[in-house]
Image (tube, helix red, strand yellow):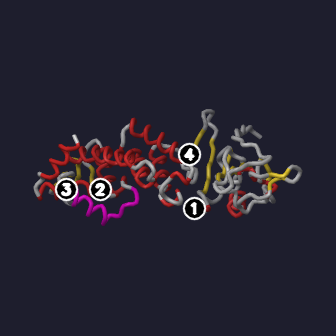
Amino acid sequence: MKDDIFDFCRNMSDEQDARARQMLERAAAKWPLRVLHVLSEANGPLRFSRVLERVEDISQKVLTQTLRTLESDGLVIRTLYPQVPPRVEYELTPLGRELLTQALDLLRAGAQRFPRSLVIRFNWIRAALHFGEQPEVTEALQILRETVQQPAEHWEVDLMEDVFPWDYFSQFFNYRAYFDCCTAGFQDSSGRSVELAGVDDPHIGRDEYATGPASGSVDVRLGLTHSPEPAVLDAMARDGFDLLLAGHTHGGQVRVPGFGALVTNCGLDRRMARGLHRWPQSPAWLHVSAGLGTHPTAPIRFACRPEASLLTLVPR
Protein backbone atom coordinates (compact mmCIF):
# COMPACT_ATOMS: atom_id res chain seq x y z
CA MET A 1 0.00 0.00 0.00
CA LYS A 2 2.80 2.40 0.94
CA ASP A 3 4.72 1.67 -2.28
CA ASP A 4 1.55 2.15 -4.33
CA ILE A 5 1.10 5.62 -2.85
CA PHE A 6 4.71 6.57 -3.58
CA ASP A 7 4.41 5.29 -7.17
CA PHE A 8 1.22 7.29 -7.65
CA CYS A 9 2.87 10.47 -6.34
CA ARG A 10 5.96 10.03 -8.51
CA ASN A 11 3.83 9.57 -11.64
CA MET A 12 1.55 12.55 -11.06
CA SER A 13 1.57 15.21 -13.71
CA ASP A 14 2.20 18.83 -12.77
CA GLU A 15 -1.49 19.52 -13.22
CA GLN A 16 -2.47 16.62 -10.95
CA ASP A 17 0.09 17.70 -8.35
CA ALA A 18 -1.22 21.27 -8.35
CA ARG A 19 -4.78 20.00 -8.02
CA ALA A 20 -3.90 17.74 -5.09
CA ARG A 21 -2.11 20.56 -3.29
CA GLN A 22 -5.11 22.79 -3.90
CA MET A 23 -7.48 20.27 -2.33
CA LEU A 24 -5.18 19.89 0.70
CA GLU A 25 -5.17 23.65 1.14
CA ARG A 26 -8.97 23.67 1.09
CA ALA A 27 -9.08 20.87 3.68
CA ALA A 28 -6.68 22.74 5.98
CA ALA A 29 -8.21 26.21 5.65
CA LYS A 30 -10.62 27.67 8.20
CA TRP A 31 -13.48 29.11 6.15
CA PRO A 32 -13.86 26.72 3.20
CA LEU A 33 -14.64 23.73 5.42
CA ARG A 34 -17.15 25.71 7.44
CA VAL A 35 -18.92 26.95 4.31
CA LEU A 36 -18.97 23.46 2.83
CA HIS A 37 -20.41 22.10 6.07
CA VAL A 38 -23.22 24.67 6.11
CA LEU A 39 -24.09 23.83 2.51
CA SER A 40 -23.95 20.09 3.25
CA GLU A 41 -26.53 20.45 6.05
CA ALA A 42 -28.99 22.34 3.86
CA ASN A 43 -31.86 20.43 2.27
CA GLY A 44 -31.29 22.34 -0.96
CA PRO A 45 -29.61 25.44 -2.37
CA LEU A 46 -28.94 28.37 -0.03
CA ARG A 47 -28.97 32.06 -0.79
CA PHE A 48 -25.90 34.09 0.07
CA SER A 49 -27.64 35.76 3.02
CA ARG A 50 -28.54 32.37 4.54
CA VAL A 51 -24.98 31.12 4.24
CA LEU A 52 -23.75 34.33 5.88
CA GLU A 53 -26.17 33.79 8.80
CA ARG A 54 -25.06 30.20 9.40
CA VAL A 55 -21.27 30.57 9.17
CA GLU A 56 -20.42 32.20 12.49
CA ASP A 57 -18.03 35.17 12.60
CA ILE A 58 -17.38 35.30 8.85
CA SER A 59 -17.55 38.69 7.12
CA GLN A 60 -19.47 39.32 3.92
CA LYS A 61 -16.24 40.02 2.03
CA VAL A 62 -14.54 36.81 3.19
CA LEU A 63 -17.63 34.74 2.42
CA THR A 64 -17.80 36.20 -1.10
CA GLN A 65 -14.14 35.33 -1.71
CA THR A 66 -14.54 31.85 -0.20
CA LEU A 67 -17.59 30.99 -2.33
CA ARG A 68 -15.83 32.17 -5.48
CA THR A 69 -12.85 29.95 -4.69
CA LEU A 70 -15.03 26.93 -3.93
CA GLU A 71 -16.96 27.47 -7.15
CA SER A 72 -13.78 27.64 -9.21
CA ASP A 73 -12.59 24.41 -7.54
CA GLY A 74 -15.78 22.62 -8.53
CA LEU A 75 -16.87 22.17 -4.90
CA VAL A 76 -19.86 24.50 -5.07
CA ILE A 77 -22.43 25.29 -7.77
CA ARG A 78 -23.55 28.90 -8.12
CA THR A 79 -26.91 29.54 -9.78
CA LEU A 80 -27.95 33.04 -10.85
CA TYR A 81 -31.66 33.70 -11.43
CA PRO A 82 -32.37 36.59 -13.84
CA GLN A 83 -34.89 38.53 -11.80
CA VAL A 84 -35.09 41.90 -10.08
CA PRO A 85 -33.35 42.00 -7.70
CA PRO A 86 -31.04 39.18 -8.88
CA ARG A 87 -31.18 35.99 -6.83
CA VAL A 88 -28.07 33.84 -6.35
CA GLU A 89 -28.04 30.40 -4.73
CA TYR A 90 -25.21 28.04 -3.79
CA GLU A 91 -25.24 24.26 -3.52
CA LEU A 92 -22.63 21.64 -2.69
CA THR A 93 -21.36 19.38 -5.48
CA PRO A 94 -20.60 15.65 -5.00
CA LEU A 95 -16.90 16.58 -5.07
CA GLY A 96 -17.51 19.03 -2.23
CA ARG A 97 -19.19 16.34 -0.13
CA GLU A 98 -16.31 13.98 -0.80
CA LEU A 99 -13.77 16.60 0.30
CA LEU A 100 -15.56 17.01 3.66
CA THR A 101 -15.32 13.26 4.32
CA GLN A 102 -11.68 13.04 3.27
CA ALA A 103 -10.71 16.11 5.32
CA LEU A 104 -12.11 14.46 8.43
CA ASP A 105 -10.16 11.26 7.73
CA LEU A 106 -6.99 13.29 7.16
CA LEU A 107 -7.30 15.12 10.47
CA ARG A 108 -8.04 11.87 12.32
CA ALA A 109 -4.92 10.30 10.83
CA GLY A 110 -2.86 13.29 11.94
CA ALA A 111 -4.14 12.98 15.50
CA GLN A 112 -3.21 9.30 15.54
CA ARG A 113 0.22 9.92 14.00
CA PHE A 114 1.14 12.73 16.39
CA PRO A 115 -0.73 11.80 19.59
CA ARG A 116 1.21 14.23 21.80
CA SER A 117 0.52 17.31 19.70
CA LEU A 118 -2.32 19.33 21.17
CA VAL A 119 -2.61 21.49 18.06
CA ILE A 120 -3.16 18.52 15.75
CA ARG A 121 -5.40 16.74 18.23
CA PHE A 122 -7.67 19.74 18.76
CA ASN A 123 -7.89 20.36 15.01
CA TRP A 124 -9.24 16.83 14.63
CA ILE A 125 -11.67 17.21 17.57
CA ARG A 126 -12.90 20.54 16.23
CA ALA A 127 -13.51 19.16 12.76
CA ALA A 128 -15.23 16.01 14.06
CA LEU A 129 -17.60 18.01 16.25
CA HIS A 130 -18.40 20.48 13.52
CA PHE A 131 -18.55 18.27 10.43
CA GLY A 132 -18.92 14.72 11.69
CA GLU A 133 -21.93 12.47 12.06
CA GLN A 134 -22.92 10.94 15.42
CA PRO A 135 -20.09 8.32 15.56
CA GLU A 136 -17.43 10.97 14.92
CA VAL A 137 -18.99 13.32 17.49
CA THR A 138 -19.03 10.56 20.13
CA GLU A 139 -15.42 9.65 19.36
CA ALA A 140 -14.31 13.29 19.48
CA LEU A 141 -15.96 13.93 22.86
CA GLN A 142 -14.27 10.84 24.30
CA ILE A 143 -10.88 11.99 23.00
CA LEU A 144 -11.52 15.46 24.40
CA ARG A 145 -12.32 13.96 27.81
CA GLU A 146 -9.08 11.93 27.77
CA THR A 147 -7.08 14.94 26.59
CA VAL A 148 -8.05 17.33 29.36
CA GLN A 149 -7.32 14.66 31.99
CA GLN A 150 -3.67 14.41 30.95
CA PRO A 151 -1.09 16.44 32.94
CA ALA A 152 0.36 19.46 31.15
CA GLU A 153 3.83 17.90 30.87
CA HIS A 154 2.41 15.15 28.67
CA TRP A 155 1.92 17.55 25.77
CA GLU A 156 4.31 19.17 23.32
CA VAL A 157 3.24 22.70 24.25
CA ASP A 158 3.86 24.63 27.46
CA LEU A 159 0.30 25.74 28.15
CA MET A 160 -2.93 24.12 27.14
CA GLU A 161 -4.54 27.55 26.95
CA ASP A 162 -2.33 28.39 23.96
CA VAL A 163 -4.15 25.98 21.69
CA PHE A 164 -7.44 24.94 23.32
CA PRO A 165 -10.21 26.40 21.12
CA TRP A 166 -12.45 27.71 23.91
CA ASP A 167 -14.55 29.87 21.62
CA TYR A 168 -15.15 27.04 19.20
CA PHE A 169 -16.38 24.61 21.84
CA SER A 170 -18.74 27.26 23.19
CA GLN A 171 -20.19 27.61 19.69
CA PHE A 172 -20.40 23.83 19.34
CA PHE A 173 -22.41 23.32 22.52
CA ASN A 174 -24.72 26.18 21.56
CA TYR A 175 -25.20 24.50 18.19
CA ARG A 176 -26.06 21.22 19.96
CA ALA A 177 -28.82 23.04 21.93
CA TYR A 178 -27.04 23.34 25.27
CA PHE A 179 -27.95 26.42 27.29
CA ASP A 180 -25.50 29.30 27.17
CA CYS A 181 -25.87 30.55 30.72
CA CYS A 182 -24.71 34.02 29.70
CA THR A 183 -27.97 34.53 27.84
CA ALA A 184 -30.38 31.72 28.76
CA GLY A 185 -33.72 31.25 30.39
CA PHE A 186 -35.84 28.11 30.58
CA GLN A 187 -38.75 26.33 32.25
CA ASP A 188 -38.39 23.16 34.28
CA SER A 189 -40.68 20.14 33.93
CA SER A 190 -43.16 21.58 36.44
CA GLY A 191 -43.52 24.80 34.45
CA ARG A 192 -41.53 27.04 36.79
CA SER A 193 -39.51 29.68 34.97
CA VAL A 194 -35.79 30.12 35.65
CA GLU A 195 -33.59 32.99 34.54
CA LEU A 196 -29.85 32.43 34.18
CA ALA A 197 -27.05 34.96 33.85
CA GLY A 198 -23.38 34.15 33.75
CA VAL A 199 -19.87 35.20 32.88
CA ASP A 200 -16.86 33.29 31.60
CA ASP A 201 -13.41 32.90 33.11
CA PRO A 202 -11.71 36.13 34.32
CA HIS A 203 -8.29 34.58 33.78
CA ILE A 204 -8.76 34.84 30.02
CA GLY A 205 -10.54 38.21 30.16
CA ARG A 206 -14.02 36.78 29.61
CA ASP A 207 -15.85 37.89 32.76
CA GLU A 208 -17.50 41.06 31.50
CA TYR A 209 -20.97 41.19 33.03
CA ALA A 210 -23.58 43.13 31.07
CA THR A 211 -26.83 41.24 31.62
CA GLY A 212 -28.78 43.94 33.44
CA PRO A 213 -31.61 43.70 35.97
CA ALA A 214 -33.25 40.33 36.44
CA SER A 215 -36.78 39.82 35.16
CA GLY A 216 -39.55 40.26 37.71
CA SER A 217 -41.76 37.67 36.02
CA VAL A 218 -39.68 34.54 36.71
CA ASP A 219 -39.74 32.18 39.70
CA VAL A 220 -36.02 32.05 40.42
CA ARG A 221 -32.96 33.94 39.19
CA LEU A 222 -29.56 32.24 39.14
CA GLY A 223 -26.19 33.89 38.54
CA LEU A 224 -23.25 31.71 37.49
CA THR A 225 -19.55 32.48 37.42
CA HIS A 226 -16.44 30.34 37.28
CA SER A 227 -14.45 32.50 39.68
CA PRO A 228 -16.34 34.30 42.49
CA GLU A 229 -14.92 37.75 41.89
CA PRO A 230 -16.64 40.31 44.16
CA ALA A 231 -17.19 42.86 41.37
CA VAL A 232 -19.24 40.38 39.35
CA LEU A 233 -21.10 39.06 42.40
CA ASP A 234 -21.95 42.62 43.50
CA ALA A 235 -23.37 43.40 40.05
CA MET A 236 -25.48 40.22 39.96
CA ALA A 237 -26.79 40.87 43.47
CA ARG A 238 -27.71 44.47 42.56
CA ASP A 239 -29.58 43.19 39.52
CA GLY A 240 -31.80 41.01 41.67
CA PHE A 241 -30.42 37.50 41.21
CA ASP A 242 -31.44 35.23 44.10
CA LEU A 243 -28.65 32.66 44.13
CA LEU A 244 -25.06 33.08 42.89
CA LEU A 245 -23.15 29.89 42.03
CA ALA A 246 -19.37 29.65 41.68
CA GLY A 247 -16.39 27.32 41.91
CA HIS A 248 -12.68 27.92 41.23
CA THR A 249 -11.50 28.19 44.85
CA HIS A 250 -11.32 24.40 45.45
CA GLY A 251 -12.70 25.31 48.86
CA GLY A 252 -9.40 26.97 49.69
CA GLN A 253 -7.71 23.63 48.88
CA VAL A 254 -5.37 23.88 51.88
CA ARG A 255 -7.28 24.61 55.07
CA VAL A 256 -6.01 24.94 58.65
CA PRO A 257 -8.31 23.34 61.24
CA GLY A 258 -9.90 26.04 63.36
CA PHE A 259 -8.81 28.76 60.91
CA GLY A 260 -10.14 27.69 57.51
CA ALA A 261 -8.88 28.49 54.03
CA LEU A 262 -5.56 30.27 53.65
CA VAL A 263 -6.34 31.68 50.19
CA THR A 264 -9.12 31.65 47.60
CA ASN A 265 -7.06 32.42 44.43
CA CYS A 266 -9.42 35.31 43.69
CA GLY A 267 -10.77 38.43 45.38
CA LEU A 268 -13.27 36.52 47.54
CA ASP A 269 -13.01 36.69 51.32
CA ARG A 270 -11.34 33.45 52.46
CA ARG A 271 -14.23 32.82 54.91
CA MET A 272 -16.47 32.25 51.88
CA ALA A 273 -14.10 29.84 50.12
CA ARG A 274 -16.72 27.09 50.15
CA GLY A 275 -20.35 26.50 51.08
CA LEU A 276 -23.39 28.73 51.34
CA HIS A 277 -23.19 32.35 52.53
CA ARG A 278 -25.36 35.43 52.41
CA TRP A 279 -23.74 37.89 50.01
CA PRO A 280 -22.94 41.08 51.98
CA GLN A 281 -25.42 43.96 51.86
CA SER A 282 -27.89 42.10 49.64
CA PRO A 283 -30.65 39.49 49.84
CA ALA A 284 -28.70 37.19 47.48
CA TRP A 285 -27.07 33.94 48.54
CA LEU A 286 -23.68 32.72 47.31
CA HIS A 287 -22.74 29.06 47.04
CA VAL A 288 -19.13 28.14 46.26
CA SER A 289 -18.43 24.49 45.50
CA ALA A 290 -15.13 23.12 46.82
CA GLY A 291 -15.00 20.94 43.71
CA LEU A 292 -12.90 17.88 43.01
CA GLY A 293 -9.60 19.20 41.64
CA THR A 294 -6.56 21.18 42.63
CA HIS A 295 -4.56 24.09 41.27
CA PRO A 296 -2.15 22.91 38.51
CA THR A 297 0.92 24.22 40.37
CA ALA A 298 -0.16 22.90 43.80
CA PRO A 299 -1.73 19.46 43.26
CA ILE A 300 -2.59 18.80 46.93
CA ARG A 301 -5.58 19.20 49.24
CA PHE A 302 -5.38 19.36 53.03
CA ALA A 303 -8.32 19.36 55.44
CA CYS A 304 -10.55 20.11 52.44
CA ARG A 305 -12.47 17.11 51.19
CA PRO A 306 -13.36 17.06 47.46
CA GLU A 307 -17.03 17.58 46.81
CA ALA A 308 -19.62 17.70 44.08
CA SER A 309 -22.46 19.97 45.12
CA LEU A 310 -26.13 19.09 44.60
CA LEU A 311 -28.46 21.92 45.55
CA THR A 312 -32.20 21.47 46.03
CA LEU A 313 -34.21 24.64 45.52
CA VAL A 314 -37.55 24.81 47.33
CA PRO A 315 -40.31 27.44 47.08
CA ARG A 316 -40.20 30.26 49.63
Can residue 209 be seen here?
Answer: no
Q: Considering only order in the chain, which callout, 2 or 4, is on the residue closer to the N terminus?
A: 2
227 with respect to 271 (left or right):
left
Type of amino acid under label 1: Arg
Residue at mark 4 to residue at mark 1: CA–CA distance: 23 Å
Quarter of the image where the N terminus is located: top left
The residue under label 3 is which amino acid type?
Glu
Q: Which residues are magenta?
A: 56-72
Which residue occupies the extreme front position in the image? 3
User: Quick check: 274 left or right of 13?
Assistant: right
Measure the alpha-carbon separation of dots 1 and 2: 28 Å
Tell me which label, 4 or 3, sits earlier in the chain: 3
Q: Secondary structure at mark 2?
A: helix
Please report the residue visible at 27 percent of the width from the left and 53 percent of the height from the top: 47
- The residue pinned by badge 2 equals 32
Magenta-span inclusion, residue 286? no
Residue under numbered circle 4: 149
Pick the residue in front: 105 or 275.
105
Q: CA distance from mark 4 to mark 2?
A: 32 Å
Going by the picture, which residue comes out furthest to the right? 258
Q: Residue at x 44, y 42 (%)?
A: 140
Of the numbered discs 4 and 1, the one sitting upstream in the chain is 4
Q: Residue at (50%, 55%) from the top-left corner?
A: 166
Image spot of residue 214 (x, y percent): 65, 54
| Magenta residues, dominant SS class | helix
